[in-house]
Amino acid sequence: MSTLHSPNYTASTSSYNCCFASSSSSSSSSSSLFVHYRRIGVPSVSTTYDQKKVSLQYRNVVRMQDGAVAASAPLKTKELKRLKDELLSVKYPAECKDSTGFGSKEESTVSITVVGASGDLAKKKIFPALFALFYEDCLPKHFTIFGYARSKMTDAELRNMVSKTLTCRIDKRENCNEKMEQFLKRCFYHSGQYDSEENFAELHKKLMEHEGGRVSNRLFYLSIPPNVFIDAVRCASLSASSASGWTRVIVEKPFGRDSESSAALTRGLKQYMAEDQIFRIDHYLGKELVENLSVLRFSNLIFEPLWSRQYIRNVQLIFSEDFGTEGRGGYFDNYGIIRDIMQNHLLQILALFAMETPVSLDAEDIRNEKVKVLRSMRPLQLGDVVIGQYKSHTKGGITYPAYTDDQTVPKDSPTPTFAAAALFIDNARWDGVPFLMKAGKALHTKRAEIRVQFRHVPGNLYNRSFGTDLDRSTNELVIRVQPDEAIYLKINNKVPGLGMRLDRSNLNLHYAARYSKEIPDAYERLLLDAIEGERRLFIRSDELDAAWSLFTPLLKELEEKKIIPEYYPYGSRGPVGAHYLAARYNVQWGDLRAERHQTD
């Protein structure tokens, strides 16, 4: 019997490695699991998956509660290999060349509408990411891109605007101009209001013309202010959704300002779309080194037994920018650094880092574990937080402005541009381990990294060689998310020679030196996942609720008590209070110590 005509088979063997799979907005968890296994190239023959059977494949995966149980509860060889195979099944751009359609390639199409197409995010990130996917043959054969905004613009004007931001990969320059021309011919524009069903109905007619009677799948990217999210989703759902395929919407942060506003936004969105149609994007989850976290931990036997309170002394999540708000002060002043960076980017990384071993790599299994971490965390207390704001500073004859010098910021604004916090996870694996977060603007360097500081070696025979500063001998795993992506492990070793002199060295995986390919932008990965219906790197509503519940009491207390931030000079290492916060837990910030010892 032909596989294409049998009700018990989903596709012929020629489609096993397709990156794309046709799915409706109401697809079940079993079909989502099927899409996942097609992505990793595992031949699949039946549409009827028993999720319990799939889950049982991993029933004996060790869920370490403490590093000490590693020796008594090892993973079975077959199970370890199965999970490792999943983790190692990375989808490279070359694989996208077999992924030019959904299901029946000739009969379906994807229409991507960028709502807010005239804004900076669309111009600098979304359109370039879509072009990169097109260049790598990761978009389906039939696709159309529409820009939608209030600005009056022609198709030609949109193409001219978009063309100024498109670039080709450094390692793939052939036929670049030709590819750009082909891409721009697929780009169109429609002007309309974000709350007008009539304008969206006009967009719908244009989309239908380009879809040409094929099965239509539609993705709306909301690159607009949050106060019009619900209006835009209502209009898209009622007037421009697909009648024959799926309809999805990507929502950019901020997802509210606190628990109440976030819940109201979620309720508003769910009036018009189901949860599995809503893709809440946090672009940090699409960064290469963040996605590599689970691979590093779960596919390398040396790390998982150490990933607990028994061996890890503290974990640091550090984000710093070497520039201020620079004209974005009006937006930033309404949110501040805690809402802008800590509650989403850094907290999402923390949840991925600290989660238990998921049953599988299915999106829901991973997100379930992240939610467990967030629900196990203590709500932040005012005493565990330091806030700061940068002030004017003159260096090298150049005067740098204060935050309140920004014309869009009130002169007496108490909005923090820096925050440091100590968080704790009250479960068996992480009990007592401080997770230190630090985020700030106008600091001395630009970086985003995860630092895992291990405990001191008990009864260390070589303590004399390090003197009284035991931290100098501490092993440290550093995952540098940006810039200049790298993973390195700090170890102690003997300096060559006749004497016994110890040195600290790095076992370094420097991505630029190891891999010749340019690392894709986070938006490329996330857009591709949204088109595929892969939700693993997007935020679920209960995950969002749990995140806000940690920070909302703190944010309200800061605003009600009108806490004045500690001032720090533009271009400095931040407020002194951050060092006292770390010292309270007998910790030194790893990025500053590394600079002092010049070991990075």
Image: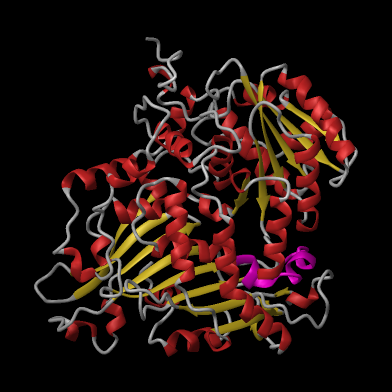
Q: Is 529 placed left or right of 394 in the picture? A: left
> Residue 161, relative to residue 377: is it above or below?
above
Query: Can you name the residue that lies furthest to the left here?
Result: 498
Q: Residue at x 32, y 71 (%)?
A: 429
Is 431 in front, or is 171?
Answer: 431
Q: Is residue 321 visible?
A: no
What type of secondary structure mainly makes up the magenta span?
helix
> Residue 352, relative to residue 476: is it above or below?
above
Query: Can you name the residue that lies furthest to the top here?
Result: 1
Q: Residue at x 27, y 51 (%)?
A: 59
Quadrant where the C terminus sits is: bottom left
Is 200 in front, or is 174?
Answer: 200
Is 128 in front, or is 371?
Answer: 371
Which stretch did the figure color magenta? 325-341
Q: Is 486 placed left or right of 390 in the picture? A: left
Residue 440 picture location, percent across and down: 60, 72
> Residue 57, relative to residue 477: is it above or below?
above
Residue 64 magenta-highlighted = no
Residue 104 picture location, percent across and down: 54, 18
> Residue 464 lies in what quarter of the image?
bottom left
Q: Residue at x 80, y 34 (%)?
A: 158
Is 107 in front, or is 170?
Answer: 107
Quadrant where the N terminus sits is: top left
**Number of numbered callouts drawn:** 0
Residue 328 magenta-highlighted = yes
Residue 134 picture location, percent across and down: 59, 29
What sort of colour scheme is used for the picture? secondary structure
Q: Is residue 524 visible?
A: yes
Residue 363 picture location, percent across and down: 46, 47
